[in-house]
Structure formats: C-alpha cells, structure tokens
C-alpha cells in the first residue's frame, strides 16, 4: 500500500505501510528525505480484526505541512478497506474520532473506545519491541 499525495505546501508526499509483528506503522515520506513521520499500530491476531493506533509522530522540522493529518486520514482509510475496527489509544486518533467519528462510520469505518486491556497490551508490546 503506497499512496502519493500532496501536503499543505503542494509538495508530493508518499504514505506507505510497514508491516511487522507485533508493531506495524503507516509512514509518510518526502522525496529525497528520510521517513519524516509514522503512525504505529497493532493489529489484533484474533477474529475481531481490531487495529490499535497508539503512537503518531512527525519530525518537528516539517511542522505545519499537514503531514500528521495526511498520515491519520490514510491510516483510517486503510482500516476501512481492510475491515479493521479502530481503537484510538493515540491522542491524535482519539481527538479526530471524537470529532469526526460519525463521518468515519458513514464512510464504512468502525471504532471503539480503548479499554485498560488495550493500553496494557500496547505497553507490553511496545516495551518488548524497543
């Protein structure tokens, strides 16, 4: 999955997905620059098909270009395409879904509020992966 888009300055950006076990990420890249942002997530291994987004960051050197929003929108669009229910542990995803959750659902998405068990899972797996 690679999407070519443009940022707020009109410059091209590429959003891709890095799949790994247990932590995967959507990434945003600029031509000629290293990866400048990522939204990390865990896909559930069970039949629930849940995707827990827990950390998003963009290099502060590229602030104001809308890269975090691009990353978020593409991650949510991919979650709709793949049939995953989004669990927003990441504050960026949580704020977005609190404000635009009805729109996300009308586009075919599904999301739920994270539980303590979700946060514990992220803590355990993120600690193991570091």
Image (tube, rainbow, N blue to C red):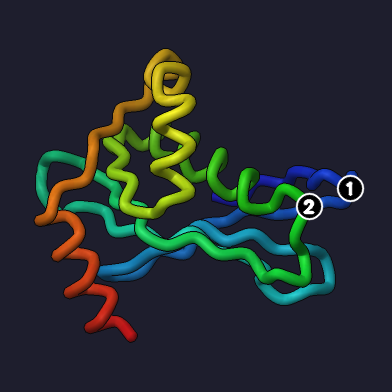
Indicate the quadrant containing the C terminus: top left, top right, bottom left or bottom right: bottom left
For this view, does 113 lie left or right of residue 17?
left
Disc 2 element: loop
Q: Eyeballing the image, is 120 above or below 77?
A: below
Residue at (49, 45) in percent of width and height: 75
Q: Position of residue 91 (x, y in %)?
A: 42, 51
Q: Position of residue 94 (x, y in %)?
A: 39, 42
Q: Residue furthest right?
A: 10
Q: Quadrant of residue 105?
A: top left
For this view, does 5 lie left or right of residue 99?
right
Q: Quadrant of residue 14?
A: bottom right
Residues at marks 1 and 2 touching, judged by CB atoms closer than 8 Å:
yes
Residue at (37, 26) in percent of width and height: 109
Query: Label 1 vs label 2: CA separation?
Result: 6 Å
The earlier-in-sequence mark between 1 and 2 is 1
Q: Residues within 10 Å of mark 1 (few under 14, many from 20)?
A: few
Residue that badge 1 annotates? 9
The disc label shown at residue 65, or none: 2
Q: Eyeballing the image, is 107 above or below 86?
A: above
Q: Eyeballing the image, is 69 above or below 101?
A: below
Residue at (21, 41) in percent of width and height: 49
Q: Position of residue 66 (x, y in %)?
A: 72, 48
């Amino acid at each position: 999955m690679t999407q070519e888009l443009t940022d707020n300055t009109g410059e091209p950006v590429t959003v891709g997905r890095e799949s790994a076990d247990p932590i995967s990420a959507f990434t945003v890249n600029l031509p000629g620059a290293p990866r400048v942002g990522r939204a990390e997530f865990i896909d559930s291994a069970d039949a629930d098909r849940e995707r827990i987004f827990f950390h998003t960051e963009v290099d502060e050197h590229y602030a104001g270009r809308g890269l975090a929003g691009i990353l978020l929108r593409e991650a949510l669009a991919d979650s709709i395409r793949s049939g995953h229910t989004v669990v927003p542990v990441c504050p960026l995803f949580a704020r977005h879904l609190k404000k635009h959750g009805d729109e996300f659902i009308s586009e075919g998405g599904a999301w739920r509020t994270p539980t303590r068990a979700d946060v514990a899972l992220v803590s355990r797996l993120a600690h193991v992966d570091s």
